[in-house]
Each structure stands twice: as C-alpha cells, then as structure tokens.
C-alpha cells in the first residue's frame, strides 16, 4: 500500500499468457509437446528481455553466438 514500485494490478502476467492463447486460437492447438515447449521457451525469453528493458533483436541474435545475453543478469 505504501510501496509504489509494486504494480497495482497483474496485467503484466496476463499479457505474458495472451500470446500463447492467441497462438492456440489461430492454429487450433499445438501439434506436439516439443513445439509447445519451444514456443513457450522463446516467448519467455522475449518477455524477460522486454521487462528488463533490453533490445529484443540484439538479445535474440546473441543466442546464436558464442556469448548469449542472459537478460536476468544485471
């Protein structure tokens, strides 16, 4: 109630789930467990990168290099 750094609502968590539901709605379902797992891992990484204020494209490109960016580190 006194700490204004804490969000008032949980919209951020709901937005994270939205893309999975949109994907499921458009395609009907995920074709395999492996595909669903890959989709959620990529979405989780992109979501974390955005929340940390880092450049999304730079972080995705870094995954394919020898030194990938870990968005959870300072």
Image (tube, helix red, strand yellow):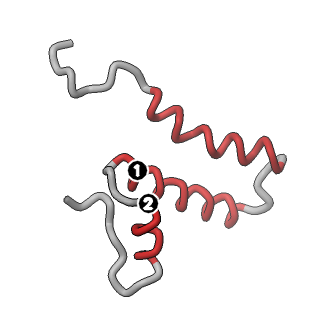
Front residue of this view, candidates 16 and 56: 56
Please provide percent x and percent y for residue 56: 44, 60
Q: Earlier in the sequence, mark 1 or mark 2?
A: 1
Indicate the position of residue 48 as horizontal and vertical percent values: 40, 52
Residue farthest to the bottom, as pictured: 66
| Nearest the eye: 40 or 15 | 15
Image quadrant where residue 30 sits: bottom right
**Looking at the image, which residue is at 36% across and 46% down?**
51
Q: How many marks?
A: 2
What residue does disc 2 label?
Answer: 56
- Return the mark for residue 50: 1
Q: Are marks 1 and 2 in contact (CB under 8 Å)?
A: yes
Q: Which mark is residue 38?
A: none
Q: Residue at x 17, y 21 (%)?
A: 3
CA gap, disc 1 and disc 2: 7 Å
- Number of residues whose C-alpha sits closer than 10 Å to that of mark 2, classed few (under 14), some (14–19) or many (20 or more): some
At label 1, counting other C-alpha atoms closer than 10 Å, the crowd grade (few under 14, some 14-19, many 20 or more) is some
Whether residue 66 is situated above or below residue 54 in the rendered picture: below
Identify the image quadrant of the N terminus.
Answer: top left
Left/right of residue 71 with respect to residue 16 in the rendered view: left
SS type, badge 1:
helix
In the displayed orientation, state which residue is furthest to the top. Answer: 1
In the displayed structure, does residue 17 sit left or right of residue 69? Answer: right
Residue 4 in which image quadrant: top left
> Which image quarter holds the C terminus?
bottom left
Q: Position of residue 26 (x, y in %)?
A: 80, 45
Residue 53 vertical placement versus 14 (above, below): below
Percent coordinates x, y for residue 70 in the rendering = 32, 66
Residue depicted at x 32% and y 25%: 7
**Residue at the image point whose x is 52% and y is 32% from the top:** 14
């Amino acid at each position: 109630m006194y700490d204004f750094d804490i969000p008032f609502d949980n919209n951020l968590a709901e937005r994270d789930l939205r893309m999975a539901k949109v994907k499921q709605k458009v395609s009907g379902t995920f074709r395999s467990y492996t595909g669903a797992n890959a989709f959620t891992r990529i979405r989780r990484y992109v979501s974390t990168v955005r929340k940390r204020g880092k450049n999304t494209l730079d972080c995705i490109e870094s995954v394919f290099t020898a030194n990938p960016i870990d968005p959870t580190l300072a």
